[in-house]
Image (tube, rainbow, N blue to C red):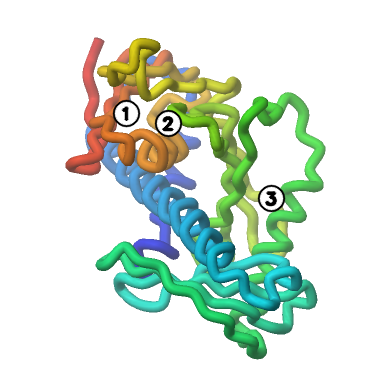
Amino acid sequence: MKRIIILLLPWLFIILPAIAQESKTLPNAQELKAANDSILADAYNLYLYEKIAWILEDELTNCQPATINEIAGWIPVGEGEDVVKGIFYNKDKTKALFEATYSFLTSTPTGKAAVRDLSPEEIDMINVREKVLLAVRKLDVKDLPSCPEGCTFNTEVIPIDENLYRVYWMLGTTQHGIIPFGCDFSYDCDSEGNIKGFRRYHKTYIPTLLKMDDGSPVRDIVHSHLSFCPLIAPTDIALFLLYGYEAGLSGFKVYSTAYHCVFSFDPATYVINIEQM
């Protein structure tokens, strides 16, 4: 599980810019499979980071350690094949104050106060994350979407390799019965905070209901993508897994205006299928 959580296929960084043009012709089968495989890998890691954040921060709140007011942030650390640990640290980035773990085998979190010195590796992880986030937040980028009412922007820093990190901005919401698709984008940065790439996935907010007004379940979830994001986005899949799949929905579809086809995501098999129009 550690390998799945912290590593992403770098193909997406290479392939998507090559095929995300105004082309009306689908990439060949090999290119399309490679791109979709990379999207699936990105999406799964993004889903895990968000899910683990929810679980471990809830565990911190439930435990209420004496040092909770001193905690400035946390980092996820892969501990084993099926266990993830979150280390909560102080403002000076010198001490670990609380540790929480989550087992994928038993679906149970555990937490404990653990005041100790941070290791050099842990300090490096924190510094890189903060440097990358600071670099992105200082950018003056025009025409980025604002956060819709009832939502928050969640940011996740996903390592691609030793010197490349992908910073995702995607929506979260506490509103019941909604998948908060839309208003999402990402930057690629090196460990010094130099911006290496930018992607936008949706321009607008697409709040998607899980049930009809009469309480009956939604049968099909479909939204469209413009030419700058011709495939299903990693954020689409991550948000569906977080809000839709756990609510019992069986999948969703994206209509690609660039390729004039429909891409569908099947969570049961974890594949992206294509349906020609």
Instruction: Identify the secondary structure beneath mark 2.
Output: helix
Could you tell me if the residues under marks 3 and 1 are in contact, i.e. CB atoms within 8 Å?
A: no
**Residue 193: image location, x then y, percent:** 71, 58
Task: In the rendered view, tell whether residue 205 sits above or below residue 162.
Answer: above
Mark closest to the chain's N terminus, 3 or 2: 2
User: Which class describes the residues within 10 Å of circle 3: few (<14), some (14-19), or many (20+)?
Assistant: some
| 35 with respect to 91 (left or right) | left
Residue type of the residue flagged with mark 3? Ile
Q: Residue furthest bottom?
A: 116
C-alpha separation, residue under disc 3 versus residue under disc 1? 28 Å
**Residue 191: image location, x then y, percent:** 65, 65
**Residue 138: image location, x then y, percent:** 81, 47
| 81 with respect to 204 (left or right) | left
For disc 2, the marked residue is: 19
**Numbered disc total:** 3
Residue type of the residue flagged with mark 2? Ile
Could you tell me if the residues under marks 1 and 2 are in contact, i.e. CB atoms within 8 Å?
A: yes
Residue type of the residue flagged with mark 1? Pro
Front residue (pair 140, 157): 157
For disc 1, the marked residue is: 27
**Residue 149: image location, x then y, percent:** 67, 26
